[in-house]
Amino acid sequence: MKHIFLSTTILIIVTLFAVSVNAIEKSEHPVPIDDKSCATCHEKGSTDEMQAAPEAYTQWDTSLHKLNGVSCITCHGEESTFKPQSTISTCASCHSIEVDSMKTTETCASCHQVHTFRPLKGFKSPHD
Amino acid sequence: MELSRRNFIKSTLAASAAVAAGISTNSSAVAQTQEVVVERWVKGVCRLCGTGCSVYVGVKGNRLVAMKGNVESMTNTRGYLCVKGMNIWKVAHHPDRLTKPLIRDGKGVLRPASWDQALTLIEKKFKEYHKKYGYDSVAYYGSGQCTTEESYTFNKLWKGGFGSNMVDGNPRLCMASAVAGYMSSLGSDEPAGAYADIEKSKTIFLVGSNLSEAHPILFRRVTRHKKDNPDVKIIVCEPRKTLTSSVADLWMPSLPGTDLAIFNGMAREIIKNGWYDKEYVKTLGRVTTGDGSKELTWDDYVKHLEKYTPQYVEKKTGCPAADVKNAAKMFAQSDATLSMWCMGLNQRANGVWANNLIHNLHIITGNYGKPGADAFSLTGQPNACGGVRETGSLAHLLPGARPVANKKWREFVEGYWNVQKYSINPSKAINPKPGMHAVKLFSSLGGEKDKTKPVKAVIMSTTNPAQTLPNVNKFIGGMQDAFTVVIDIFPTRTAQCASVVLPAAFIYEKGGVFGCSERRSFLTDKAVNAPGEAKADIWIAAQIAKRMGLTKLIGWANETNIDRMNELAWNDYIGCTANTEKTLKGATYKRLKESTVGVQWPCPDEKNPGTYKRYVRGMDPIFDNPKRYGYTIPDDAKEFFYARPHGKANIFLRDDPDNSEQTSKAYPFIMTTGRVLEQWHTGSMTMRIPETAAAHPHSFVEINEKDANRLKIKNGDIVKVESIRGSNILPAKIVNNTLEGVIFVPMHDQKADRMVNFICSDIVDPISAEPDYKVSAVKITKVSGPKKIDGRYLVTREEMNKKSFS
Ligand code: SF4
């Protein structure tokens, strides 16, 4: 598992250093989104379609991001711009103070639960 | 030494990717990437809403590649942006950009033309119509999205050069009631306070505003303030229980068009319980009625309010009586109350009165001059305040937001512009008679054959009236028949009606000043060149000026450098308004270039930091030299509404008439319209951003579940929404967060059978002439079960050649 993770990371690094802004590595959403709302499949208990990653949706549902209108699409894009994990540049659109204060080895998710963005226990904030 | 991310990016400069592993709580691996190469960051403001978020646009070569918030900003504090703002740069390089002038030929086809051909045709038509039909037969219809320099230039060209006040703009459709409200209640347009009052307030009264979607970054400030200070009370008064209400201590439902009764009811409770500020009322209030000329007594006011018992209010508005009492208490018994409102109050048959009644509540409770207290009207567009209200680019105003009918001011402006010498109108003067407001202008627009239509030509910039006017069907023929010139960056419904389409530069391709809701002017620097032959509006205005013989009036007409043109226009503008309370004399172009926070007027000189709070000694520089601005302020006055006689604000006796369209047996529902978070105006930009288009690809109709049950309408069913004027076919969205009998349709969709303004009422406020978009009587019928919707609809280049809308 660890090996797969490491090689994926290296692959992404290699790929990304080779790309320019207009040729961002393309990821495909596993199934066509077709202008459906994300909640259709991701909200817990939604019955219309197959259920996918409901924990992520549930976490987001209680987050300040939700309250402030930062929805799935804001961070993950839509069908043509889909990214399974958000990018630092996306986070930096709003959180450049925090991003600027991070070490290069860190990502937002190093210290924040991904979809609630509450700080994880035991991490010292680098943003002070 | 460990590298910070900022240093890492700086030190590698070309670092296009910084990938690292993260750990999520469910221990799956998360990789985050830095995919954007930014060569330089250029400061500016967001192109979209009136919040005026300050940004940096990321540039690589001649392309915009990213956007980030300005962390020093006073508007979007800490640099937050909403999903629209962070993605708006994407429209700059969209393949649909208009890049060449187009002239419609005899067969109705828009053919590419040179700038010389397009401008020659405009010159010919304008001169011909001036001669044949008079100077008022040619109009300019502008926008709260043009820069201040552009609006000022067109305004000067028309009012000073042609001697015609046929200048209006789309702020008439959104802000005119707020303007008239401020002028009649306080004597001077625009708020006394600023966004900084949010964090200082103890009670926030949000009324007629779905802040969470229309001004999301201000909503973020409100939610953060509430989170940090749970004692702060938030009251939300709106017909729909939107996300905005989720942070409210009290949601006051009200049937659209009825809330004047709520405001009077709250005033009654405040007075009855002795919660009003007697001293403030005595020193700074004056009871009046009608146009404000007749003074009445406090007892008259109390008597007038007798009718507005909580029970009466409940019956009329649907707002529970107990809520009225509660709201009155929270409003009056806080140390500082801040009201914020938007189109829910302005776009109303009684919009000005609604504004007056909010001011009443603030006057009787003394909620203006102290930190955290204000009556704050939010603007919908990024430069409606700075560009249109302050430059006076409306039919009844002159720069400084002073009426054209004001002889003294008109003569000053005539002198400043040297109208006597330069005007091409034989009167050699500014016309003392106001021009036509938007709805009247478009009702009066038509072809040469139509003798009933006195307006024969219009040039429209950065706005889309063929989609945005209420009861729009009424105006499309006139736009098609008249000589219409459209300046825009994309094909729109209005461009579809145009005789000539001029390709415009986007804000980051030309730069210029935007002034947001809080009196703050901010200069956006030019970041990249415009594509193809697209040009800045100020250049277009200059070419028209030259061809019409007004080179000397528009002193920057012969310039070729847009930055220099902007600077000269700005200097002319701030000189013109230097002796008004709108003064930005201290906001020199150099200062604006260097500033990363902008400047709030009044700002009379370069040493002045700009003004957070008006009407208060020690904060408002007008107190330092009132004579310069034509005012008299007693030496001992700490707070003083100097634009009103004796510094007293008007407490208006205003009733609650039913001037909006009323429901009937045939049309039993009230339809209200508004924004959704991810879209903006007619969607010509946001429907071209993949993320925002996907989030809201088409309109829908929100129906209360009880109404839906009765009509056997289920979620996703296709329904027809119809008024006496027109109809839409929309998917239903069944909700339980709105009052029964009220439906909501967003306003952004361009598809002909989903353009909500075909349905909307074209009743206008009798004072401000702002349309009543918020109240239309409609019926709804089920058409079919769920169907696939052709979302993300956009008017294409090809459709611009068709007469009918698809
Ligand atoms: S809140 Fe308004 S100004 Fe701010 S980023 Fe969003 S659209 Fe732009």
Image (spheres, rainbow, N blue to C red):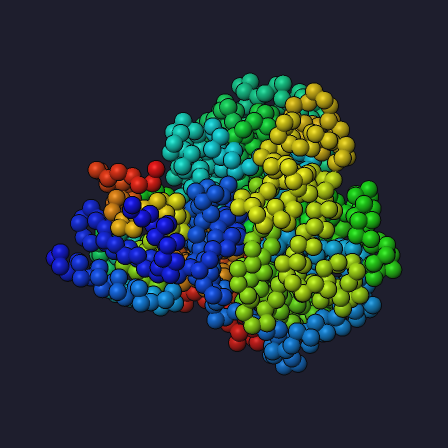
Residue drawn at x 36%, y 66% is A20
Task: Using the image as rendered, state which of residue B448 and residue B521 is in the foreground.
Answer: B521
> At 82% from the left edge and 54% from the top edge, which residue is drawn?
B419
Residue at 42% over, 34% down: B225
From this view, report whether residue A21 is shown above or below residue B614.
below
Q: Look at the image and tell me in which quarter the C terminus of chain A lies.
A: top left
**Whole-percent x, y for residue B734 in the image:** 37, 51
B225 left or right of B623?
left
Q: Position of residue B3 (x, y in %)?
A: 31, 48
**Quadrant in which residue B505 is drawn:** bottom right
Pick out the residue farthest to the front: B1
Question: Relative to the observer, which residue lies in front, B386 or B61?
Answer: B61
Pick whichever, B88 or B766, lies toward us: B88
The residue shown at (55%, 62%) is B509
Residue B538 percent across, percent down from the top left: 66, 61
Residue B141, can we see it? no
